[in-house]
């Protein structure tokens, strides 16, 4: 009997620099390893329980472990404050406040939930899961999302960006003031400045977190959480809250999660496009039954080629798992830290760029 593969792949957002300060690189590596390890343990526990269950006819403790796994990984990354996600790590808007987006999707029945512009929530991904499982809706934003969080008792404190992010914000406001003679933080007057500023300051680039997983039953899932683009207009919602753009999951094909320039990713419906291209349908260029390929890897590369061809380099990254349990990732920025832990590995591994991904995916 062929052992069904299971595992988790997570990312900590695309970045425009290839080299990280040594300490930061270590912190990112260990946080990603810990998050993928915790998530993998959920998948592994379920797999063991399933074996027992098959022998003894016991109840399984968790219905769709792939969903629990992606949620757990994203919660760990939100809590770390190291990424552009969750109340501590998120970049502030142009008005200095944090507004977060998150979404989650189950490939078993394509159920999904998302939240946008949320404040005062410790773990936006938990609220997205509540939207998916406890409401009849797919997306809830702003005040309504906060009310929902209150109802389910997951309202947090006021979101305060880290000192590190506030320093970046204060530097930005100072430069903005010098450029404009006034410190009026009105986006319409300043959007050209902001665009150029972000191009010049590559430490203000992205950093969203995301995860894809497959469990032993072949259920796939995807989750994503972000503070969105640095110094964005209040009320702006990015790809991370848009199903089919920031993420997609369908057991027939696989699961996908994107990061990068949300406005470009939304225009291409990139997650759904990539997920469809993993499918076994006549239009899919990935399918050749005589020569099975890693469809997650092939479709990740194709999605990033598409993104680059329409919007240029330095616009995004993707992680994916196909319905056979193969994992893949690609990016057109300098780096995107990822961590992979599958049932054929003894411990989680991390990689930071396309060359390192090649090694990682060929050895697992
Ligand atoms: N995609 C996110 C957004 O545009 C940003 C990121 O991935 O870092 O909101």
Image (cartoon, grey):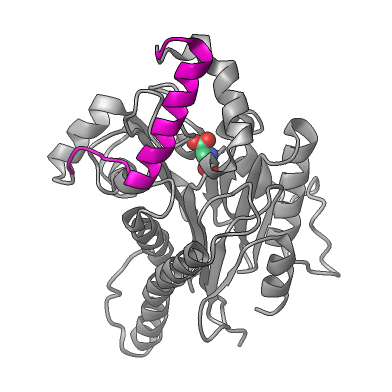
Q: Residue furthest bottom?
A: 55
Q: Quadrant of residue 119?
A: top left
Query: Does residue 115 appear anywhere in the picture?
Result: no
Q: Nearer the viewer, residue 64 or 15?
A: 15
Q: Is residue 182 found inside the magenta-colored segment of the image?
A: yes
Nearest to the observer: residue 29 or residue 9: 29
Residue 322 lies, with reference to residue 131, above or below; the image says below
**Is 57 displayed left or right of 292 in the figure?**
left
Rendered location of residue 304, percent (x, y): 72, 46
Q: Is residue 328 above or below residue 201?
A: below
Q: Residue at left 84%, top 62%?
A: 288
Magenta residues (range) = 155-183
Check the picture and name the quadrant holding the N terminus: bottom right
Seen in the picture, residue 88 relative to 228 is either above or below; the reply is below
Task: Report x, y in % for residue 204.
Answer: 52, 40
> Foreground: 279 or 91?
91
Asked whether residue 66 is drawn in magenta, I would say: no
Residue 300 position (above or below residue 94): below
Q: Is residue 81 left or right of residue 346?
A: left
Question: Is residue 349 visible to us here?
Answer: yes
**Main secondary structure along the magenta-highlighted residues:** helix
Going 36% across and 80% down the picture, which residue do you hit?
A: 45
Q: Position of residue 357 (x, y in %)?
A: 69, 66
- Residue 253: x and y in percent read 63, 55
At a point 49% along the width and 34% down the height, the residue shown is 229
Q: Quadrant of the C terminus?
A: bottom right
């Amino acid at each position: 009997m062929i052992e069904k593969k299971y595992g988790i792949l997570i990312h900590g957002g695309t970045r425009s620099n290839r080299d990280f300060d040594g300490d930061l690189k270590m912190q990112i590596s260990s946080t990603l390893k810990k998050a993928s390890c915790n998530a993998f343990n959920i998948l592994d526990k379920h797999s063991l329980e399933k074996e027992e269950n098959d022998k003894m006819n016991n109840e399984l403790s968790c219905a769709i472990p792939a969903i629990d796994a992606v949620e757990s990984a994203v919660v760990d990354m939100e809590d770390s404050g190291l990424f552009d996600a969750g109340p501590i790590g998120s970049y502030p808007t142009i008005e200095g406040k944090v507004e977060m987006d998150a979404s989650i999707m189950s490939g078993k029945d394509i159920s999904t939930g998302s939240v946008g512009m949320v404040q005062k929530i410790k773990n936006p991904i938990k609220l997205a899961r509540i939207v998916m499982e406890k409401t009849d809706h797919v997306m809830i934003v702003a005040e309504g999302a906060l009310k929902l969080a209150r109802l389910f008792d997951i309202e947090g404190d006021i979101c305060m960006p880290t000192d590190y992010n506030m320093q970046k914000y204060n530097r930005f406001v100072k430069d903005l003031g010098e450029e404009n003679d006034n410190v009026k933080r009105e986006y319409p007057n300043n959007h050209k400045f902001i665009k150029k500023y972000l191009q010049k300051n590559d430490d203000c680039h992205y950093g969203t977190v995301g995860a894809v997983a497959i469990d032993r039953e072949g259920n796939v899932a995807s989750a994503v959480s972000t503070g969105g683009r640095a110094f964005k207009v209040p009320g702006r919602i990015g790809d991370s809250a848009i199903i089919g753009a920031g993420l997609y999951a369908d057991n027939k094909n696989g699961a996908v999660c994107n990061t990068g320039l949300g406005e470009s990713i939304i225009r291409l419906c990139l997650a759904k496009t990539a997920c469809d291209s993993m499918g076994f349908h006549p239009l899919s260029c990935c399918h050749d039954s005589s020569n099975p390929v890693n469809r997650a890897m092939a479709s990740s590369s194709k999605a990033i080629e598409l993104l680059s061809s329409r919007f240029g380099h330095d616009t995004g990254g993707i992680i994916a798992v196909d319905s056979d349990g193969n994992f893949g990732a690609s990016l057109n920025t300098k780096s995107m830290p990822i961590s992979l832990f599958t049932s054929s590995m003894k411990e989680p591994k991390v990689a930071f760029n396309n060359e390192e991904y090649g090694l990682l995916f060929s050895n697992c």
